[in-house]
Amino acid sequence: MLRTARWALLVLLAALTGEVAAGRSWEYTTASEIFGPRAIGDDVVFVESGEAGTRIVRLNAGTGRPVWSYAIEPGRRLLRLPTVDGQKIYLYSAAIENERDDGSAIETRLVTLDGGSGQVASSLSLPTRDLVVHSPFVANGRLYFATVPRDDNFYEPSRHPPGSFVACELASGRIVWKTALPLRQARATDLQNLTLGSRSVNPWIARPTEMTADESRLYLGYPNGRLFGLDLRTGAIAWQFRTRDRFLVSPVLQDGVLYFGSQDWNFYAVRAATGTLAWSAATGADVGHSAPLFDRDQIIVSSGEYQLLPISSIVMFSNPDANDYADHSTNSILALDLVSGNIRWRHDGASVSYGPLLRNQRVVIFDARGLRTELDPDRGTVLREQALNMLLRGVTPVTGNRLVLQTSNIAFFRRGTHFRDLVTDGDIRDRLLGSDE
């Protein structure tokens, strides 16, 4: 009999410098999958989703004990990762018309949780029946969101209605402005199955899909490969910048420039005032799995093959024809000149990296195999490596010199291997998943 999947969060003390194996202070274990751990005060909040349902959990980062949990109501699903804003947590909860079609949300609700207690502070039904693209973005008493349409004939562009950008009052839900997207959608397959529920999990939920803003404009990526700058007051589109492939990751605004990666294998710097290109750098693979790291006059980014992630083991057991999910086989860490975008150095690895982080004048990265690497920030040379002997799925810094590591006992599958082949091959099955007689 196959062993139950185990997903865990654990804290390593002094994890950013020196040996870390002896610093493990606690471990939180669950049979459900864990998504999007984020720091909140001195603690960590994350999504836990499996056959038992989906819930938001806050853990004490000092003890590993739950502070509170909030369960998504039966019959509803979580849309996107929650947004943590100080001591408030915003999330989208959606009623789904067809349980096998995550794009069939018929009513979406913004739920605001008190970060201290986990209690519902407010709830607002969104004035739309379309699918919301990003994690919640709240500013100046307003909720801003972008939608893609619910369309039964999704693959017929001539009948496909436009999406929209919307701002509504947080207190009443009154629409302040609504701007139609002035072009048809591109890459329809990328817009489907973007929800997180108790029956299936799509890899896009693990990617940050957030908006950002300055005093006058809202900036967001859209699944058709474009970055938009909108007037916060009126919703008018000030400019749009087009990439050559999917763009669902979050742009980072720094000193008037928006930095972001695309699945067209480029990393971009775009001027926020005009939407014009400052520079782009060819990375050789997808960019955007991890947030970039700003270090003096350079920006350090992670690039690799991230489009294939594991899905729930329960789904795979019940549906051996589920999509192929393969091992993260390539990864690179690149240091780019902030002014020109020129590549200063490149570190190539064999597995997806989490980070990069900067501590004590060293770039620290962790990879999915559990290898911790310290790099020289000026040359990219390896200064130190340490095997943690665990399978990593994410790294979240918390207060002090501590990291919360997301782990799993489910190994990523070999490239090109279908799950139905794994369950019929005893050696592969036992080696990857383990077995109990």
Image: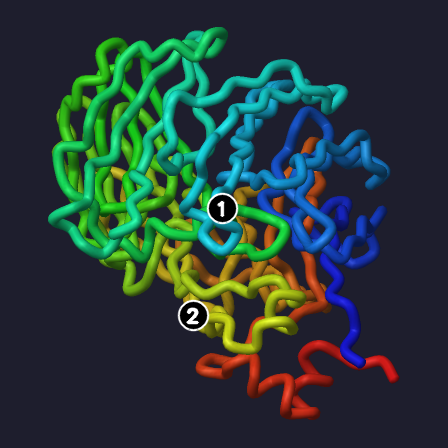
Camera-side residue of 240 and 43: 240
- Label 1 SS: strand
Judge the density around disc 2: few (<14), some (14-19), many (≥20) Cα neighbours within 10 Å.
Answer: some
Amino acid under label 1? Thr
Judge the density around disc 1: few (<14), some (14-19), many (≥20) Cα neighbours within 10 Å.
Answer: many
- Label 2 SS: loop
Q: Earlier in the sequence, mark 2 or mark 1?
A: 1
Assign the N terminus to one quadrant of the image.
bottom right
Q: Residue at x 32, y 63 (%)?
A: 285
Residue 264 appears at what percent x and percent y? 24, 57
Q: Along the horizontal axis of the image, is 173 left or right of 364? A: left
Q: Which mark is residue 63?
A: none
Q: Is residue 122 above or below residue 197?
A: above
Visible in this render: residue 100? yes
Residue 171 appears at what percent x and percent y? 49, 7
| Residue under numbered circle 2 | 330
Report the mark closest to the observer, 2 or 1. 1
Residue 57 appears at what percent x and percent y? 72, 37
Camera-side residue of 410 and 315: 315
Q: Residue at x 48, y 43 (%)?
A: 97
Q: Is residue 262 above or below residue 256?
A: below
Q: Along the horizontal axis of the image, is 156 left or right of 406? A: left
Q: Residue at x 70, y 53 (%)?
A: 18
Q: Which mark is residue 195?
A: 1
User: Quadrant of the rendered structure where residue 257 is?
Assistant: top left
